[in-house]
Amino acid sequence: MHPFEFPLDLPARGSRQRLHALHAQLRAAILDGRLKSGLRLPATRELALALGLSRNTVVAAYERLFSEGYLEARRGAGNFVATLGAPRVPPPDSGSADRRLAAPWRGLAVPMQAAMVPGACDFRLGIPDQRAFPFDVWRRLSMRAWRTAARLPPMYDAPQGRPALREAIARHVAFARAVACGPDDVIVTQGAQQAFDLLARVLVTPGRTVVAVEDPGYPPVREAFAAAGASVVGVPVDDEGLVVERLPAQARVVYVTPSHQFPLGVAMSPPRRAALLDFARAHGATVIEDDYDSEFRYGQRPLEALQTLDRAGSVCYVGTFSKCLFPSLRLGYAVAPAWLQPALAHARRLADGFGDPVAQETLAAFIAEGHLARHVRRMRRLYAQRRERLLEALHRHSDGRMDVWPSGAGLHLAARLPRDIDAGGVAARAAQQGIQLEALDGYALDRPGPNGLAFGYGRVEEGGIEEAVRRIARLLG
Amino acid sequence: MHPFEFPLDLPARGSRQRLHALHAQLRAAILDGRLKSGLRLPATRELALALGLSRNTVVAAYERLFSEGYLEARRGAGNFVATLGAPRVPPPDSGSADRRLAAPWRGLAVPMQAAMVPGACDFRLGIPDQRAFPFDVWRRLSMRAWRTAARLPPMYDAPQGRPALREAIARHVAFARAVACGPDDVIVTQGAQQAFDLLARVLVTPGRTVVAVEDPGYPPVREAFAAAGASVVGVPVDDEGLVVERLPAQARVVYVTPSHQFPLGVAMSPPRRAALLDFARAHGATVIEDDYDSEFRYGQRPLEALQTLDRAGSVCYVGTFSKCLFPSLRLGYAVAPAWLQPALAHARRLADGFGDPVAQETLAAFIAEGHLARHVRRMRRLYAQRRERLLEALHRHSDGRMDVWPSGAGLHLAARLPRDIDAGGVAARAAQQGIQLEALDGYALDRPGPNGLAFGYGRVEEGGIEEAVRRIARLLG
């Protein structure tokens, strides 16, 4: 393409006429909105070249547009179409426009990002510390993967993911988590969220399927199931994890975080694990086991994964590299029973075709060469120290008013507050002091959530923990 | 994580007892399937280190397992769990297992990749030639993006994509295609397929929404809409593109490829474009304009995009970098009217969270520094030569039996065959001679497709075209 193929009809010759035509047609395009306000115009040299004009002609046309207020310059950034009065398309009254959307998608606002508070003491959940990540190693492996890719014929890849990564993930989960699987059981996804979304597509019959989730629990998963047309039911959680006897008999999908409940942090007890697998067998239900951060374990050996205990092909295990490496990697995976595998592969083919092969080959090499194991080992020591410091501080300062749920893994823990203290208010006042932390009620679904606070220690500076907790304790009044 | 945390209980001391315990517990794990056949065991050194055993103990345990047939060695590849008789989980009879899947997802097989026939003359559709791609530039920009990413705090990014890429895409389509948009109108997707899938999610009410597609047309899009619960209706295509007067009045979504119809290659005529926009306005329908390969144009200036002509916010424009760069990049985008933007952003947030920021920053720099424009210019010259050669050869050898549809853009063209010649049979016999080409009937939906062949010239060697066409012509008998 030319850098500029905006339709323009310019006289063959005569710089005066050509200047006039160029100016008039650009102005018309700006007025009727084909060139929108805020758009940067090509550099005069670039445009002159593309249109076979002298640069002076283009400069003159731009200057006219400036003088008329159609363009504005931003220092060092170039020439931009100015903001004029009314936009071309009168925004269709959102009512009528919205009616073109399927009901669940109407009346939404563009999602906002949680702002990073500079210099804040950051207790938010699910954010790892990537400062210790060996980016140099990653870049080297990435370069190698790009060199290989450059030699391959262009291709539309398999939706399940690159064989090398599926093999590496199978070994990783088989040996790190005793999850029983081979490469064919693994489907690579765009973060764990895509695994949940693909499962929602293939397991949910809109308006019919009942999906049980932990309450309190992880909102993006229940939102994905609701968007797929499921009726999502919250099931309470106690110190042993999901209260299995409270599962509705109609539930055909059960989403759980047995290693480290999100957000309370408790582990599901062995009896509950057995009961959940019995429920799944008895009702032909599928259990989705979200093992999002259990690489980080402190103290005793972990309980076996549900997938390991399952003998009926009822469990789909989902893992992610967002916590043990970092979120912007966008790589997760599902270890699925045989009957689920073709459906998940087809669902991914329709969802986005297939994943980025270079990123997948890079991660495969990173795992195969032992960098993943090394990095997790290093980070676990770091997180263990922060966790210790946090537990000490909570014990020392809370005066018994912050009662920590038992938790032996992951990147966060949670503490219960007395009924009469408003956790949301505490979090809000803490934010004013530059302390980012979350109240548990934000994770509740069908019932008032436990009254408490969640403390992520993935990002927080160890040195700042004690003082932050002291301040939070003071906010309890 | 240790490289090996498979649950093992080993006596504190006594190498003989520890050897016995290690061997017995590994064997048990293999027998009950927790260690699956085909899985590679850790190297003896690695395992000894992880378990605090002498390496000799591990070697001895492995040797016993070998002698008993539980392990097998593959030259240079390590020690693998051997294939034993019955798998642990009797594969649930697929009927009952399948009933756990939503109806559209039952009875599928794992999708297969189209095999590359080595040394074949490759006329398949939609595959660009990436041998001329400046991978060195890409690697450099990618390295720069990684260095920047390493300095940023870990984050969960915005679902709409990186601001720099949305800005670069807005300029690209505004100037290259006269599409009226600013950065806020752009949502970056994981290839164009994700854009279609997100649109299907937010525009389709399962069991209610009628979606009209071109027939013949692009299967993955209609499959995505069908999977979302739409009733998909095929509308015929002629030399002027979609036959708009044949659109069912109930259609609320219309998918078209106006620049270069897939697979026939024709451009939608101006009257048809106007008629389609009238239809959309009159029925409150949304038009999805798939502009997948129109960067490559030969001859006259392109017709304006539907999005450019639209004055009612009815058109969502979808583009991709799979054709002008290469497919494994997995980057596409939608330019959406304001009323669609929040829904698409939320749909992506639930689908997979957000895209890979490093890949997006790399592409943003690649576009901003003019490499995209340069590459497309270079490739257009190359493709134009192949196209010329192909048209000449078809004219010279077809004897009037291969009637090419008019086509001024893209990476492929199509030719009609006489009724009495079986296009599928010709393609099959051509494959036996190492010529990969596709019969058009594979793209038909509700009606017998036009009888003909499609010729992609993205991958084919210019030198091989004439001979290949001569052979194909001979196959017409």
Image: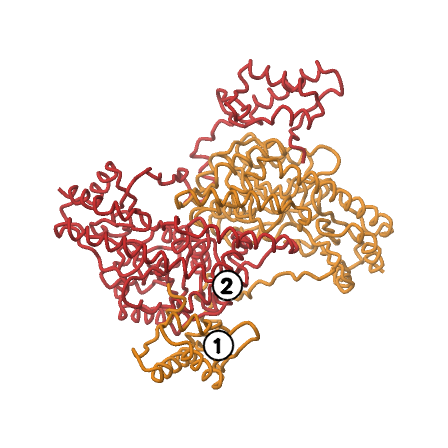
Chain colours: A red, B orange
A64 horizontally vs A238: left or right: right
Q: Position of residue A257 (x, y in %)?
A: 33, 60
Question: What is the three-letter code of the residue carrying label 1?
Answer: Val
Foreground: disc 2 or disc 1 = 1
Q: Residue at x 48, y 37 (%)?
A: B163
Q: Position of residue A301 (x, y in %)?
A: 30, 68
Image quadrant containing the N terminus of chain B = bottom left
How many numbered circles does the render carry? Answer: 2
Please tell me whether residue A296 is drawn above or below residue B47 in the rendered image. Answer: above
Instruction: Say whether residue B226 is visible.
Output: no
Residues marked 2 and 1 touching at CB (< 8 Å):
no
Q: Which mark is residue B81?
A: 1
Image quadrant containing the C terminus of chain B = bottom right
Extreme bottom residue here?
B68
Marks 2/1 same chain: no
Q: Residue at x 64, y 35 (%)?
A: B273
Question: What is the three-letter code of the residue carrying label 2?
Answer: Arg
Instruction: Say whether residue A281 is visible.
Output: yes
B374 horizontally vs A206: left or right: right
Q: Chain of mark 2?
A: A
Quarter occupied by residue A120: top left
Q: Chain of mark 1?
A: B
Q: Which mark is residue A166?
A: 2
Query: Helix or strand or loop: what does disc 2 sit on?
Result: helix
Q: Position of residue B251 (x, y in %)?
A: 55, 44
A150 horizontally vs B468: left or right: left
